[in-house]
Amino acid sequence: DVSCIPFFLATVVIGNHVVLNLFLALLLSNFGSSSLSTPTADQDTNK
């Protein structure tokens, strides 16, 4: 019974890191796509 505690804690820590990594990747990809589309709109208005 005591041996399951380290396994549970490791699973929780690794799971939290995976979820955080996926969330940050999604967040950064949204910022990257918006910053790439903004200069093209500015170039169209300058022409």
Image: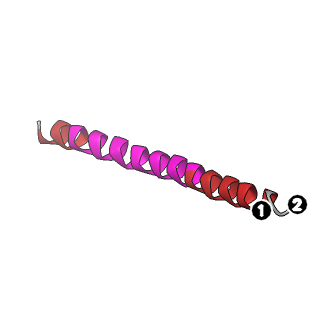
Q: Which residues are magenta?
A: 18-40
Q: Is residue 10 left or right of residue 21?
A: right
* Residue 1: percent from left, percent from top: 88, 60
Q: Amino acid at mark 1?
A: Ile
Q: Is residue 34 left or right of residue 23?
A: left
Identify the element where label 1 is drawn.
helix
Residue extending farthest to the left is: 47
Q: Which quarter shows the C terminus? A: top left
Name which residue lies at 71% across and 60% down.
6
CA gap between label 1 and label 2 equals: 8 Å
Asked whether 45 or 3 is in front, the reply is 3
1 and 2 marks in contact (CB < 8 Å)? no
Q: Residues within 10 Å of mark 1 (few under 14, many from 20)?
A: few
**Dot 1 corresponds to which residue?**
5
Q: How is the image coloured?
A: secondary structure
Q: Quadrant of residue 16?
A: bottom right
Q: Is residue 26 above or below residue 3?
A: above
Q: Does 23 sit left or right of 12 as displayed?
A: left
Percent x, y of residue 31: 37, 49
Residue 4, percent from left and from top: 80, 57
Check disc 2 and report the residue beneath it. 1
Left or right, residue 41 beside residue 32: left
Most common SS among magenta residues: helix
Q: For the residue labelled by badge 2, is the local secondary structure a helix, a strand or a loop?
A: loop
Tell me if residue 16 is in the magenta stretch. Answer: no
28 shown above or below 5: above
Q: Is residue 29 magenta?
A: yes
At 16% from the left and 39% from the top, the residue drawn is: 43
